[in-house]
């Protein structure tokens, strides 16, 4: 009977984790849609700049849309897709790109 308990525990655990992940995705999707003003499924630099305008980070400093865009556009094609947005901002990549010429 012990094994059965383990299995059901794992099963419940998996379901809970799965639901959690979905909730985050939904939140992210809603936020993504908010930023994507023209609803073409991609966030352009202008859209991100407008969205972050007047917003501050945890330290109270104005948000750097340029840097966030560099770190959010993972494949560097000039737009942030929902997939890229869901992965989050890659700050390491952003700083690397900011340092690189061009
Ligand atoms: Ca857009
Ligand atoms: Ca991209």
Image (tube, rainbow, N blue to C red):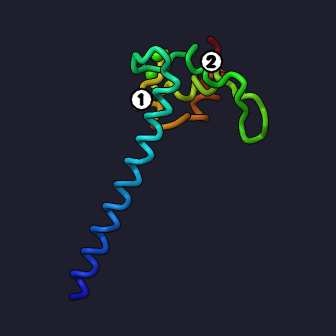
At label 2, counting other C-alpha atoms closer than 10 Å, the crowd grade (few under 14, some 14-19, many 20 or more) is some
Place of residue 70 in the rendered image (x, y in percent of width and height, measured from the top left): 58, 23
Place of residue 30 in the rendered image (x, y in percent of width and height, measured from the top left): 46, 34
Q: In the rendered view, does 20 fall on the left or right side of 100?
A: left
Q: Which residue is mark 2?
A: 50
In front: mark 2 or mark 1? 2
Location of residue 58 by image quarter = top right
Place of residue 68 in the rendered image (x, y in percent of width and height, measured from the top left): 61, 27
Location of residue 49 by image quarter = top right
On-image quarter of the C terminus: top right
> Label 2 vs label 1: CA separation?
18 Å
Residue that appears at 43% across and 34% down = 29
Q: In the rendered view, does 48 fall on the left or right side of 20?
A: right
Q: Which residue is mark 1?
A: 82
Please, what secondary structure does the residue beneath circle 1 have? helix
On-image quarter of the N terminus: bottom left
Please, what secondary structure does the residue beneath circle 2 have? helix
Location of residue 19 by image quarter = bottom left
């Amino acid at each position: 009977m012990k094994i059965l308990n383990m299995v059901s525990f794992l099963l419940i655990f998996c379901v809970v984790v799965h639901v959690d992940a979905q909730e985050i995705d939904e939140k992210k999707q809603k936020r993504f849609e908010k930023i994507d003003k023209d609803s073409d499924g991609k966030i352009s630099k202008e859209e991100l700049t407008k969205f972050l305008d007047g917003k501050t980070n945890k330290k109270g400093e104005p948000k750097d849309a340029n840097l966030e865009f560099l770190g959010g556009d993972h494949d560097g094609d000039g737009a942030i897709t929902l997939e890229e947005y869901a992965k989050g901002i890659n700050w390491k990549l952003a700083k690397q790109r900011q340092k690189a010429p061009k």
